[in-house]
Amino acid sequence: MKAVILGGDPSSGARVVTGKVDMVEDLIQEGSRFTADHPGLPISYTTSFLRDNVVATFQNSTDYVETKVTAYRNGDLLLDHSGAYVAQYYITWDELSYNHQGKEVLTPKAWDRNGQDLTAHFTTSIPLKGNVRNLSVKIREGTGLAFEWWRTVYEKTDLPLVRKRTISIWGTTLYPQVEDKVEND
C-alpha cells in the first residue's frame, strides 16, 4: 500500500501506513485538524447534483448600472491688467452636472464683469469649480484708433481647468503684451 498525505496532523498520518485498512476513514477525520502548526487549505472542490452526479453550475444574470467617478480639483483664474489702456474681458464656461437619469448636463456660466471697461491696475481672482468645462477667455483692449476701436489681445477657447492660471496683460494701446502662466501641482 502507498499513502500520500498532504497537510493536516502528521502523527495520525503515520498510522495510515502501519494501521488496518478499515481504520483509514477514522484516521483521515482525526488527522484533519488544521491549526497554526498544521495549516491546510482546500486545493479545489466541485459540487455535483445528487440525482445524476453532474457538476452543478448556475447560470445567473443581473442588471447593473456602471458608474464612473472622476475627481477634479477646483481651480482659480487670476486676471492681472496693468496696461496703459482700457481692457474688456469675456470669460465663459460650462459647469458639468448629471440629471436624475445619469445623463451629462452642461450649464453655461459667465463672469459677471464681462464687457465692462476696466482700467489699470485691475486684478481679480475667479474661482472655478472642479466640474468646469469649455473655459473660454477673450481680452480686448481699447486702441483709441478710429479704424480699429477694439483689438483682441488674447483669445482662447476650451482651456483645460488647472489649479491656477494667471493671465496678465500690460503694455500700451499700440503694443499690448500678454502672458498666460499655468501652475498645476
Image (spheres, helix red, strand yellow):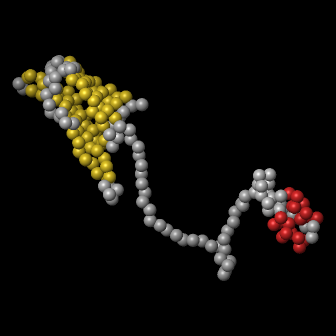
In this image, 28 relative to 183: left or right? right
The answer to which image quadrant residue 144 occupies is top left
Residue 107 in the image: state x and y as whole percent.
Answer: 25, 47
Relative to 164, is 107 on the left or the right?
left
Front residue (pair 48, 101): 101
What residue appears at the point 12 percent right and 25 percent down from the top-left corner? 142
Q: Is residue 36 above or below residue 130?
A: below
Extreme residue in the right direction: 18
Residue 149: tell me if it is visible: yes
Location of residue 33 by image quarter: bottom right
Can the viewer see residue 175?
Answer: no
Q: Position of residue 90 (x, y in %)?
A: 19, 34
Q: Residue at x 88, y 58 (%)?
A: 11
Residue 107, compared with residue 172, is above or below; it is below
Residue 122 to residue 159: above or below: above
Picture coordinates of residue 152 (x, y %)?
A: 17, 29
Question: Taking 154 as reference, is 24 left or right?
Answer: right
Where is the C terminus found, in terms of image quarters? top left
Q: Nearer the viewer, residue 112 or 173?
A: 112
Left or right: 39 in relation to 62: right
Q: Residue 110: image x %, image y %? A: 21, 39
- Residue at 80% across / 52% down in the picture? 37
Which one is nearer the viewer's eye here, 155 or 20? Answer: 20
Q: Residue at x 34, y 35 (%)?
A: 75
**Quadrant, the N terminus:** bottom right
